[in-house]
Amino acid sequence: MDVTGTLWEKYESDDEKKKKKRNREIAEKRWAIFSIASIPLVMTLGNSMLIPVLPIMERELNISPFQTSLLITVYSIVAIILIPIAGYLSDKWSRKKVIIPSLIITGIGGLISALAAWYLQSFWLILVGRILQGLGAAGAFPIVLPLVGDMFRKPESVSTSLGIVETANTLGKVLSPIAGAFLASIVWYLPFVSIPIFCFISLLMMIFLVKSPNVKDPPNFKQFLTETKKTFKYNSRWLNSVFFIGGMLMFILFGFLFFLSSRLEMEYGINGVGKGLILAIPLGSLCLSSYITGKLLKDSKKVMKRWTLVGLFLIAGSICAISFFHNLWINIGLFFVSGIGIGVGLPCLDALITEGIEDASRGTISSFYSSMRFIGVALGPPITAILLKYPERWTFYILSAMSVICILVCMIGIRPEKN
């Protein structure tokens, strides 16, 4: 205990002093954090906001459901392939030098899709724009995680900032179905028009409000391969565990969102903004729990593992319980609990990656983690659609079994107490 103060003396613990330093560091860079958090928000809006528009596009452009699904699929596939390359370039050139061109490419892709939908009514040109958006997305959101790790000296500040980033990412998911349905109710192609506008705002914020640390002695490609192999050699168990759990959490999230969306429309006749508002309930719990978890996380990797397990147990228990109830509002309540579990787990996994890997390889390793999350997003809805052809309870048995597998992987694979 130290005696501090001016006129009045008071006792201040070491934890209180650390908390003050962390809050001061975050306060000094609050506009930078806000600017960085705008990137996952924009990227999520740019993809998920189109989902309510797809049935309208089928009618307006006279295309098949398969063709409309390509607008989401090509975006994810392009991003998954290019994310590791963007991670390497961010380690070589600096995070900001990769993020800014990526936002420009995303905006150009959005502009092409908007003009194609507005003036030309051309599906294939819209698809070209979506491919460019996927290219830009690969170098935007995935690079945010290592950038946060670079900007702060204190691990507690990194954890708090990552919680804010995950909150912004989830907020995009909350707003997407509502915003997409609302804009499409005015003019069906208005969601396409909004994407370049959002990208332009985020771009200006990144240029003027964020200072990215410069890269010192960037590695050549041979050194990069050597360092990456070395990193995986000595960290393979816990890295593979974090990658697996991150991908599975996104699979479970988008799987149960797809189920809930289908059920609301087919069984209850709820669609449009009303459906978006109901989907926002579990996503809202995910958003809030991400923010709170980020604020509470410290620099202890044991604590991160413990909170990850808590989140996974919440997911497994709540999803399994859904199979015993058919009441809509009970199910939404249990999905709300699942959202809390996912919101607790994701910031912990982000922090384990950013704080557990050295600066020189952080962008590359984070990119592999982001790729796994994109794979989970891409696979969740179609596999859930296949499962819905069988008795409903089997969908929840399988999703809860996946959660149990994640619990075992976390317990066995992530062992910070053994360095």
Image (cartoon, helix red, strand yellow):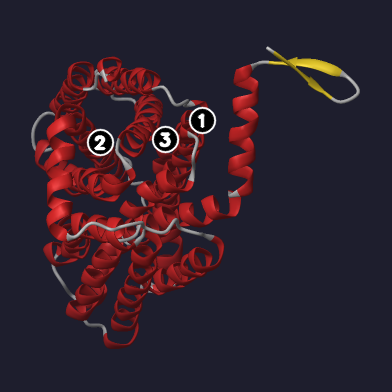
The one nearer the camera, 325 or 211, is 211
Instruction: State the CA–CA distance, disc 1 to disc 3.
Output: 10 Å
Whole-percent x, y for residue 381 in the image: 19, 45
The N terminus appears in which quarter of the rendering? Answer: top right
Which amino acid, by three-letter code, is at mark 3?
Leu
Q: Earlier in the sequence, mark 1 or mark 2?
A: 2
The one nearer the camera, 38 or 280, is 38
Q: Which residue is mark 3?
A: 286
Q: Residue at x 33, y 68 (%)?
A: 102
Instruction: State the CA–CA distance, disc 3 to disc 2.
Output: 14 Å
Q: Are marks 1 and 2 in contact (CB under 8 Å)?
A: no
Front: mark 3 or 2: 2
User: In the displayed structure, does residue 112 sit left or right of residue 393?
Assistant: right
Q: Earlier in the sequence, mark 3 or mark 2?
A: 2
Q: Which residue is mark 1?
A: 292
- Within the image, what quadrant is residue 341 found in? top left
Q: Which residue is mark 2?
A: 246
Q: Residue furthest top?
A: 1
Q: Residue at x 91, y 23 (%)?
A: 7
Q: Residues within 10 Å of mark 1 (few under 14, many from 20)?
A: some
- Within the image, what quadrant is residue 286 found in? top left
Which amino acid, by three-letter code, is at mark 1?
Ile
Whole-percent x, y for residue 41 in the image: 43, 54
Whole-percent x, y for residue 68 in the image: 19, 65
